[in-house]
Amino acid sequence: MRQPAVRLLWLSQVPYAELLALQERWLRRLQTEPGTEAGALLLCEPAGPVYTAGLRGGLTSEEATRLRALGADVHAIGRGGLATFHGPGQLLCHPVLDLRPLGLRLRAYVAALEVCAVRLCELQGLPGAHARPPPYTGVWLGERKICAIGVRCGRHITSHGLALNCSTDLTWFEHIVPCGLVGTGVTSLSKELQRHVTVDEVIPRFLEAFKETYKCTLISEDSPS
C-alpha cells in the first residue's frame, strides 16, 4: 500500500508568530478540501523567547505582563494544556495533518508524537526517555520533562504539536509552572548529554522517527505555502 505523503517545511529560526501564521494557512487549506491530502509537517527553531498558554489557561494577565517585562512574547493559543515556554535551542514541530488518510484517531496520533520524541532521544543516546500518562503528557527522563506536547484537533485536522529542548536556556522555565505540573523539572538534550546539541543536529533523526512512526513519506518544500 502506498504511504501517505506529508509536506515537510523547515522554517529554520523564525519568530513564533510566523509559525502560527503558516499553521493557519495550512489549516485553511486542509479544511477547504478535506481528505485530499495528508497535510504538512512544520518545523522551526523559535527566534526569541515566547510563553504560550493553552485552552486551559495557565497565565493570568498579571503574569503575562511580568513575563513580557522579561523580554518575552506571550501568546494565548488553541492547543490543549497550560503554560509553557518556547525559545532558541528548541525544536518546534507542528504537524498540520488530516488524520483520515493516515488512518489515525486522536489518541493514537498523540501517542505517536510521544513515540517520535522517545525515539529521537534514544537515537541521541538517551535510552531512558519515556512517555507518561496524563496529566504528564510528553516525554521524560526521570522527573525531568525534555519534550512538551500540546495539540488541537478539529474535524480530524491537527495543529500545534511538540517542543523538544535541545540546547534551550532552561532558566526561562523558572518563571512559570511548566504545564501546571508542580514539583517536576525540565531538561534538555544538551544538559543530559553534557555537550551542546543543536536543533540542526537532531532534525535528520527526528524526521527518521516521524516517517517510521506515522508510516508516511516526507516531501520537502522549499518555501512555505
Image: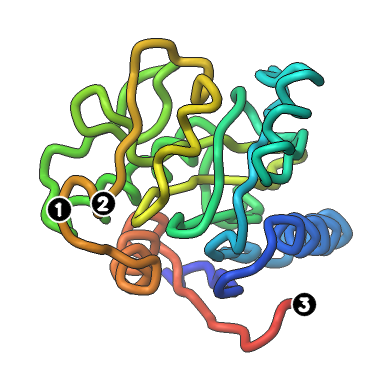
Please report contact status of discs 2 and 1: CB closer than 8 Å, yes or no: yes
Q: Nearer the viewer, residue 212 or 87?
A: 87
Q: Position of residue 104 (x, y in %)?
A: 51, 43
Q: Of helix, strand and loop, which one carries label 1?
A: helix
| Residue for point 64% across, 38% down | 51
Give amino acid for label 3.
Ser
Left or right, 88 with respect to 210, comes to: right
Q: Which residue is mark 1?
A: 193
- The mark closer to the camera, 1 or 3, is 1
Q: Nearer the viewer, residue 154 or 81?
A: 81
Q: Nearer the viewer, residue 153 or 71?
A: 71
Q: Position of residue 185 (x, y in %)?
A: 33, 25
Q: Residues within 10 Å of mark 3 (few under 14, many from 20)?
A: few
Q: Residue furthest front?
A: 69
183 up-or-down from 139: above or below: above
Please report contact status of discs 3 and 2: CB closer than 8 Å, yes or no: no
Give amino acid for label 2.
Leu
Q: Which residue is mark 2?
A: 189
Q: Residues within 10 Å of mark 1 (few under 14, many from 20)?
A: few
- Where is residue 222, by image quadrant? bottom right
| Residue for point 66% across, 36% down | 52
| Residue for point 43% across, 17% down | 134
Q: Which residue is mark 3?
A: 225
Mark before the other along the chain sequence, 3 or 2? 2
